[in-house]
Image (tube, grey):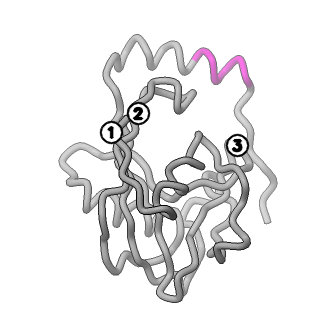
């Protein structure tokens, strides 16, 4: 297994400041409260934080949300999107993600996780399917409430 890759704090702050001035627009992202066919939740362990997170990412130019999610699930988990479910929420608090202001759409998904290997091991250190009783207490990038909304059937507009 590869060790954790961490960005030096000064470089992170400089990049964030440059991006804030250049972009000046929120980034659109999508992630999934994805479950395997047998009902386990799929999480990825990120190299930048070392913590677990919902799989997903940002929309690329010319992509639909559906296409972006299928691509991100494949890239981050090695799995295949089988089915999309309900909209769990739209999260837009500018303080949610320290990297940039993101508007993140969270949806339910069902996926085949037969391969369970990230395509970019520098970004994703590990892919794992968790039973309800095994889920980590905290997820990276304040995603814990996103998973909680999925688990309780709530819909959130932030």
Nearer to the camera, 74 or 41: 41
Determine the residue positioned at 62% across, 75% down: 129
Q: What element carries label 3?
A: loop
Residue 15 in the image, given as x and y percentages of width and height: 55, 20
Dot placed on the residue nearer the N-terminal end, 3 or 1: 1
Contact flag, marks 1 and 2 (Cβ < 8 Å): yes
Category of crowding for the residue at label 3, using alpha-carbon neighbours closer than 10 angstroms: few (below 14), some (14–19), many (at least 20): some
The residue to which callout 1 is attached is 28
Dot placed on the residue nearer the N-terminal end, 2 or 3: 3
The residue to which callout 3 is attached is 49
Determine the residue positioned at 52% across, 13% down: 17
Q: What element carries label 1?
A: strand
Determine the residue positioned at 31% across, 22% down: 25
- Which image quarter is the C terminus in? top left
Contact flag, marks 2 and 3 (Cβ < 8 Å): no
Residue 32 in the image, given as x and y percentages of width and height: 43, 61
Nearer to the camera, 36 or 50: 36
The residue to which callout 2 is attached is 102
């Amino acid at each position: 297994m590869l060790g954790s890759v961490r960005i030096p704090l000064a470089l992170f702050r400089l990049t964030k400041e440059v991006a804030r001035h250049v972009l000046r627009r929120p980034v659109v992202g999508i992630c999934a409260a994805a479950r395997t066919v047998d009902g386990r939740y799929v999480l990825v362990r990120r190299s930048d934080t070392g913590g677990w997170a919902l799989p997903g990412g940002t929309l690329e130019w010319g992509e639909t949300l559906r296409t972006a999610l299928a691509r991100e699930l494949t890239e981050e988990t090695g799995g295949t999107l089988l089915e999309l479910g309900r909209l769990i929420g739209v999260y837009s608090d500018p303080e949610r993600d320290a990297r940039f202001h993101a508007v993140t759409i969270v949806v339910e998904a069902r996926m085949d996780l037969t391969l369970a290997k990230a395509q970019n091991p520098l970004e994703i250190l590990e892919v794992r399917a968790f039973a309800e009783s095994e889920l980590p207490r905290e997820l990276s990038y304040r995603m814990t409430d996103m998973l909680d909304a999925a688990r309780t059937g709530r819909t959130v507009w932030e």
